[in-house]
Image: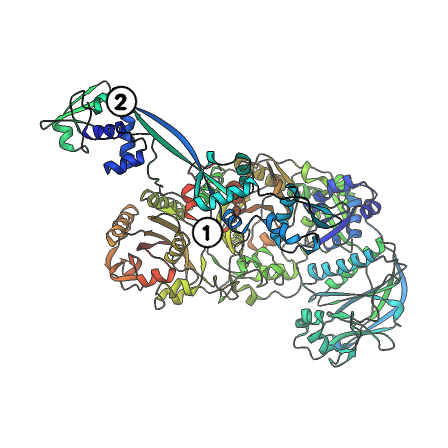
Amino acid sequence: MPVVRVYYDDMERLIGASRETIMGRLAMMGADIGKRAEEEYVDVEFFPDRPDLYSVEGVARAMQGFLGIKTGLVEYPIHKGSVVLQVDESVKAVRPFIGCAVVRGLSFTSEAIESLMGLQEDLHWGLGRNRRKVAIGVHDISRVVPPFKYFGEDPERKFVPLDFSLEMSMREILEKHPKGKGYGHILNGCDRFPLIVDAKDQVLSFPPIINGELTSVTEETEDLFIDVTGMDGMVHKALNIVVTSLAERGGRIESVLIKKNEGDFVSPNLAPTAWTVRAEEANRLIGFDLTAKELAECLERMRFGASSDGGAVRVQVPAYRADIMHSWDIFEDAAKAYGFDRLEARLPRTVTVGRAHPSEVKKGEIRELLAGLGYLETMPFTLTNEKIHFQWMRRESEPECAAAVRVKHPISELHTILRTSLLSSLLEIFAMNQHHPLPQRIFAAGDVVLARRTHMNLAAASIHSGANFSEIRSVADAVLRELAIKAEIVPSKDGALIPGRGADLMAEGSRIGCFGEMHPLVLKSFGLEQPVVALELEWGVL
Amino acid sequence: MLSENDVKVLKAISEGYSDPQRIAGKLEMKIEAVRALADALGEQGLIGVTKSVEEAVSLTDEGKKYASEGLPERILLSAIGSGKPMSDLLDPAHKIGLGWLRKKGWAAIEKGTILPAGPAPRGKDEEILQDLLLADAKSSSLLDKKGLSDLKGRGLVAFAKSKEWRYKITTEGKKWASGGMGEVFVQEMPPLTSDMIKAGQWSEVDGVLNLEYRGSSYRPRPYDVTLAADKIYPGKKHPYQRLIDFMREIMLEMGFMELKGQIVQSSFWNFDALFQPQDHPAREMQDTFYLDSLADIPDYTRVKEMHESGKGADSLGWGGVWKPEVARQEVLRTHTTGVTIKYLAEHFEPPVKAFGIDRVYRREAIDATHTPEFEQLEGIVMDRDVTFSHLLGILKEFYSKMGFEEVRFRPGYFPYTEPSVEPEVFIDGLGWVELGGAGVFRKEVTAPFGIEHPVLAWGLGVSRVAMLKLGLKDLRLLYQSDLEWLRETPVCIKL
């Protein structure tokens, strides 16, 4: 989740409340406050659905409302600007959406630049799906000459990318520049690359990869040109979040005329979205009892515009909010303003009868039984690998080998498949516990997966110098008897068992389990130096 | 009356043998038998028995290293010569040495330079290290107290307690040993047999049991009942399963029905049915275990419409195009919620109260606090007129049954609930700890399945609870268990 570094001084000044008040209530607005508060700042995590809180300015705007210092909708005036950007047909197949704005009269400290870059990166993550859907460029407009052009350019076009002093072609940037290497995959399969140039054909931006060095923002920068490109209308939300956050810092927003074949439009559009909600619906969801007027007051404290009209509330959702999709999203904000800590926690009157799942009841019986036989329960991982599960167990030709579920992108060689049986996991546990006294007797009652379906098995194993067939035969008999499983015992061909000392359990013509003395070659593979006898049995399918 | 063995031991003691080890050697008996016989002789006043507790000291691995190489401060002292800047101390062992150099007053630091300060005579601690290196183990009473406690503090020595017995003949005992009381033997009773019980004549005088059996007299040798026997461990349930069952019982008591579902799920049930957009980061293969296979999915018209335009719930939807082939991709379930929504889709008549505790899968590298699979508890309540504030009430009740008396609620964010809340519980020594997440299923989740009433839902990682309740530092212990831990964790562990 995006982390915003909140400097107390800055925050106190922007909000107009004391550090104690702010820190005492911040979490109740919706944030995870870092455990390690430093002298001058604290790192605060905000949720992925609230990109408008990814900057100190955005947090301050919200906190002012939450604390009741300034409530209601913030109006950001847009002054008519003279900058024009032409969108060329050639870019539509690659990256069709763009929103732009000019913000003037800013004074940047190095911290303010850092904060703006941080906001940009967090938006790339939170709204932009790592720049694929949304990429933001911020430029010192004094270095270039409008009008600007957004078009699809030949990948051999050269310019000097940000943080470099030499010209590179766009293709070279994808191969050599760190940002090119990081995000170049977004342009896979494109024969023209998106580019923004000025009237003199100087490069501002190569979205979504990198800006030109020419327009980089420094502490001398006062006026900004902002471009947001992407794959859908989310570009405008991101633009709104950036420009309103800059306006909170004292910037003056100017419009940009974007010319397109389908029709021109003026950007940014900061008009709020209108919703009408009813107090009774909010009450029915949250469980408080507010009048429409009280609901409107709560919403004003979340910086919505809100006015009551009978039982209804007319809500104006700020243009920088990206998360309001349904009236319940608005009601949740009302509940936050009301205070989660003030909500009554009461039990519903729903009457139902508890019921355990039959398979869990059965597992309980198995645990009682195996513990009674002196076996200690283990709960091994269900992820394993072919080497241990089949090769070491000498079961590579068993049908279960083909029925194993393999994961597509394993995270390590140890976890490539879901287990099809439990025994190998028990042998692994023995291998890990050779320094502890013998005999060791362990069992597991757990899920295995065959052909994508969950089956339920039990397995028991015993390791000690005297472990022999008759020991495990007695256990097998007891298990079958106690669980009322009717199975025929026949000689086994299981590669994991010593030939002639292994048995299969057959029920209605199919093999439901096996038991016997483990094959010495299996023991050797697991690094075990004492005899092991074991039993495994499938007792159910989910 | 004395048995043959009683007399043997008594004679040995009267000859001056005082150590049970040596008596056992002489008589070719087990030391336990000698001790038991001697204890009985002691009770009859024939010998005097002194028990003392000895504390044996030995070197730890680190202690052995220092004993042979020298203490780190000694090594550092020779390394600094006539003075050395602090910045030259790169070896981590020097850090340990430095602290002790200053503590022992062997060196001082001036302006970032370490300077030797006067003589550094060989200390008692160093003498003890040398002693122990030669002797293997030694009684603590023979060693310098201060030196020993310094070494103990540094973890260089280990202590083990052992009991010692010493015997001495009494005047009464001497008479018996010399045969002055006449050789009145009764034989030691052999292990009890069925025939002895049935055919023997049993009598008991002054707390001594006597058996007349097939013409002979026998007497059971009294045991030293205070001696420890071999340790045995019962077969038992895994402590983690004990915790899971504890939580299951809470849910059953609260009237919830238990659900089970498949480990392999379609993306449809795992993600799409829960209104997770198809390009959501959590769906990426970095976080989720995907399979090669494709699943059959139910009629998806309403889910598709909900994602694309919010139709059916007065929502805006996510926009874009929802693709059935993405929904058909199979995954190892990343949560149990897919199982829950599927159940609700089939049981949309209120009320429904259901829960599940099951294993879920996340594509995470394994370490002490992360495992690629772990248990999750999830509960839902669906009924007419249930509200978010009822959810808080259920959470309070649930956590209090779990033993967390103090609960507070903070706004949270989860993709498929609105409102969402993060419960925190107060734990002594840790403060407020976030435990699980909860919320009301979004309309966009419930509407496509015809679920008309609010669904209150919460979930939490059971292994997180295990860390708190079982005092675990490493989650791997739950799955790759150390049998010692399983054997030593009592069944009565407080959950």
The reply to whether discs 1 and 2 touch (Cβ–Cβ < 8 Å) is no
**Nearer the observer, A441 or B424:** A441
Where's residue A422, x and y in %? 38, 56
Residue that appears at 68% across and 69% down: A183
Q: Give the percent coordinates (x, y) of residue B53.
A: 41, 31
Secondary structure of the residue carrying numbered label 1:
helix
Which three-letter amino acid code belongs to the residue tagged 1? Answer: Tyr
In this rendering, position of residue B127 left or right of residue A504: right
- Give the residue pinned by disc 1: B479
Q: Chain of mark 1?
A: B
Picture quarter with the N terminus of chain A? bottom right
Density class for disc 2 (Cα within 10 Å; few <14, some 14-19, many ≥20) is many
Question: Callout 1: few (<14), some (14-19), or many (20+) C-alpha neighbours within 10 Å?
Answer: some
Identify the chain of the residue marked 2, using the numbered disc in the image. Answer: B
For image coordinates 85% across by 54% down, the residue present is: A249
Q: Amino acid at mark 2?
A: Leu
State the residue at coordinates (33%, 39%). Answer: B230
- Tell me, for residue B46, which label it has, or none: 2
- N-term mark: 1 or 2: 2
Is residue A65 shown above or below B312?
above
